[in-house]
């Protein structure tokens, strides 16, 4: 699920920099107010606790997070884009009587137009976080990124999470990978995609055939830049 904190930060930041009252703020006030949003929403921050906040936009704000909280790390779960598109199309096929908010409740769009919406670099469900991750990946704060590939997580969950705890310098938690339970039926129904956030109990890798046209699959076959060592010029950690 996506936390509202990033949206609150964005709204306040705009008002302090571009609103009618921008002249009342200097950088020190901006920083204090933005930290105040975090620390009000997460009061445990005042006790030096670790907070995990989930939002796909944080990589686009990595410099801001670095300024506010110098110890910030961003954990990015990544997967081959074609398979993400495939998963969304499968979810749509499972709910033919529903129309999704993700696609503006359109009833006549084809998979090709849906892919264009998904891959929009400004607001697409896939395109925006993919673009923001590329920005952070090649930027000066790339050292803050921790990349968790989907295949590594589902094939070797314990090894992957053990490495994550070490990197975060946090005590390891004993996970039950045969009994992972999560669901958000109310939220998923609201956006017209029942089951979108349902998680199978057992963490495991399952082979499947793609349900999207092969030209779409081929178009995005080389978009997982994190798999190319020559592009990892900043030495980003990949678990």
Image: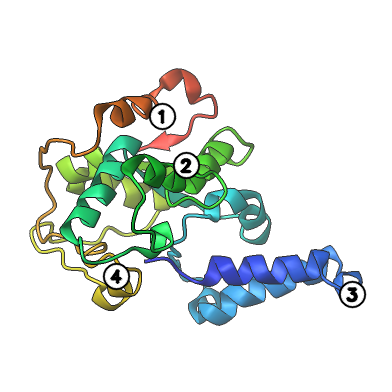
Task: Give coordinates of residue 188: x percent, y percent.
Answer: 29, 70
- Mark 2, secondary structure of its residue: helix
Q: Quadrant of residue 174?
A: bottom left
List the residue tagged with mark 1.
Answer: 223
Q: Identify the mark nearer the N-term, 3 or 4.
A: 3
Q: How far is mark 1 from mark 2, CA to CA?
A: 9 Å
- Mark 4, secondary structure of its residue: helix
Q: Identify the mark nearer the N-term, 1 or 4.
A: 4
Q: Nearer the viewer, residue 163 or 87?
A: 87
Sort mark 3 into few (<14), some (14-19) or many (20+) by Cα contacts within 10 Å: few
Q: How far is mark 1 from mark 4, CA to CA?
A: 28 Å
List the residue tagged with mark 2.
Answer: 130
Say the numbered circle drawn on residue 24: 3
Q: How far is mark 2 from mark 3, CA to CA?
A: 35 Å
Q: Identify the mark nearer the N-term, 1 or 2.
A: 2
Q: Of circles 2 and 3, which is in front?
A: 2
Q: How far is mark 3 from mark 4, CA to CA?
A: 41 Å
Say the numbered circle drawn on residue 164: none
Q: Is residue 72 visible?
A: no
- Whether the residues at callouts 1 and 2 have beta carbons within 8 Å, the answer is yes
Q: How far is mark 1 from mark 3, CA to CA?
A: 44 Å
Task: Give coordinates of residue 12: x percent, y percent.
Answer: 70, 72
List the residue tagged with mark 4.
Answer: 188
Q: Is residue 203 left or right of residue 70?
A: left
């Amino acid at each position: 699920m996506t936390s509202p904190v990033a949206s609150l930060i964005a709204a306040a930041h705009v008002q302090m920099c571009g609103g009618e009252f921008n002249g009342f703020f200097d950088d020190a006030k901006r920083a204090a107010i933005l930290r105040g949003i975090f620390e009000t929403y997460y009061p445990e921050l005042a006790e030096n606790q670790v907070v995990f906040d989930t939002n796909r936009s944080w990589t686009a704000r990595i410099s801001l997070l670095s300024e506010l909280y110098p110890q910030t790390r961003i954990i990015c779960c990544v997967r081959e884009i074609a398979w993400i598109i495939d998963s969304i199309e499968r979810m749509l096929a499972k709910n033919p009587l529903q129309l999704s908010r993700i696609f503006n409740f359109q009833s006549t769009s084809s998979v090709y137009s849906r892919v264009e919406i998904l891959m929009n670099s400004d607001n697409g469900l896939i395109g925006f976080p993919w673009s923001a991750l590329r920005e952070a990946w090649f930027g000066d704060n790339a050292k803050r990124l921790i990349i968790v590939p989907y295949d590594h997580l589902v094939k070797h969950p314990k090894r992957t999470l053990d490495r994550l705890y070490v990197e975060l310098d946090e005590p390891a938690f004993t996970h039950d990978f045969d009994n992972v339970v999560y669901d958000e039926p109310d939220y998923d129904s609201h956006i017209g995609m029942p089951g979108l956030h349902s998680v199978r109990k057992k963490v495991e890798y399952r082979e499947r055939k793609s349900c999207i046209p092969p030209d779409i699959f081929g178009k995005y076959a080389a978009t997982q830049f994190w798999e190319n060592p020559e592009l990892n010029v900043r030495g980003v950690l990949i678990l």
